[in-house]
């Protein structure tokens, strides 16, 4: 599969934010038939907060600058996705520091691509894909860091003991307390393992 086609039609981070704002306005004008206005609004608020507050420490910045950068980043996402709102700003900061092109495409407009990136047979997002110069996949990350996946498995394996509400609360606390460190480290590990 040639992922460069998706890179070429993808949105920059700035245009992705504008698209999410436009989608939010459209949902409001249509009187929120999908009942997702609150998720778009919360997602925008989180993305703006994370983008403004996430900063690399000197040690992290040194590691990023020593990382290979002969690839592009393609992210499959949606503006209403809670995990995406926490992850995408960190990915964009990584891309900026590495000086690599990053593009964002919407899952629901690219279901044919999403078929290749299911997680446990679900179309969970965000999915971050490292794309080689020839358009092939170098690595993938998502839909959440390892600890977030462990929380999800805990909920899925025993929802009577660990409720959806507890899962979402614990996941949000994790994202807030971790400040993007696991996202950064897991993506850098993938780059180190898969990009020469």
Image (tube, helix red, strand yellow):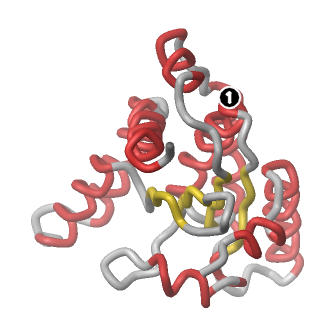
Give the x, y percent position of residue 192. Answer: 43, 39
Q: Residue at x 56, y 18 (%)?
A: 61
Residue carrying label 1: 97
Give the x, y percent position of residue 111. Answer: 61, 87
Is residue 38 visible in the rendered structure shown here? Answer: no
Answer with the quarter of the image where residue 20 lies: bottom right
- Above or below, 178 against 13 in this view is above
**Viewer-closest of 23 and 88:** 88
Tell me the SS state at disc 1: helix
Give the x, y percent position of residue 8. Answer: 82, 68
Which residue ends up furthest to the bottom in the rendered image?
Answer: 112
Quadrant the N terminus occupies: bottom right
- Above or below, 177 against 169 in this view is above
In the displayed structure image, the side of residue 21 where residue 159 appears, left or right: left
Q: Residue at x 68, y 42 (%)?
A: 92
Q: Residue at x 44, y 59 (%)?
A: 142
**Viewer-closest of 101 and 53:** 101
**Viewer-closest of 142 and 71:** 71
Answer with the quarter of the image where residue 35 lies: bottom right
Is residue 176 visible in the rendered structure shown here? Answer: yes
In the displayed structure image, the side of residue 185 where residue 8 appears, left or right: right
Which residue ends up furthest to the top in the rendered image?
Answer: 58
């Amino acid at each position: 599969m040639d992922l460069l086609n998706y890179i070429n039609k993808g949105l920059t981070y700035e245009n992705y934010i504008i698209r999410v704002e436009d989608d939010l306005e459209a949902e409001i004008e249509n009187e929120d038939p999908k009942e997702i206005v609150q998720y778009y609004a919360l997602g925008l608020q989180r993305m703006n907060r994370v983008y403004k507050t996430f900063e690399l420490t000197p040690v992290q910045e040194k590691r990023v600058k020593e990382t290979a950068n002969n690839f592009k980043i393609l992210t499959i996402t949606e503006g209403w996705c809670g995990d995406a709102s926490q992850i995408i700003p960190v990915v964009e900061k990584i891309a900026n520091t590495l000086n690599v092109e990053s593009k964002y495409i919407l899952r629901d407009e690219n279901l044919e691509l999403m078929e290749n990136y299911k997680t446990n047979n679900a179309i969970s997002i965000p999915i971050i894909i490292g794309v080689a110069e020839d358009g092939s996949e170098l690595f993938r990350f998502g839909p959440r860091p390892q600890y977030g996946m462990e929380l999800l498995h805990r909920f899925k394996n025993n929802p009577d003991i660990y409720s959806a509400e507890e899962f979402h609360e614990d996941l949000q606390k994790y994202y807030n307390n971790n400040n993007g460190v696991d996202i950064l480290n897991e993506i850098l590990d993938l780059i180190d393992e898969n990009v020469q």
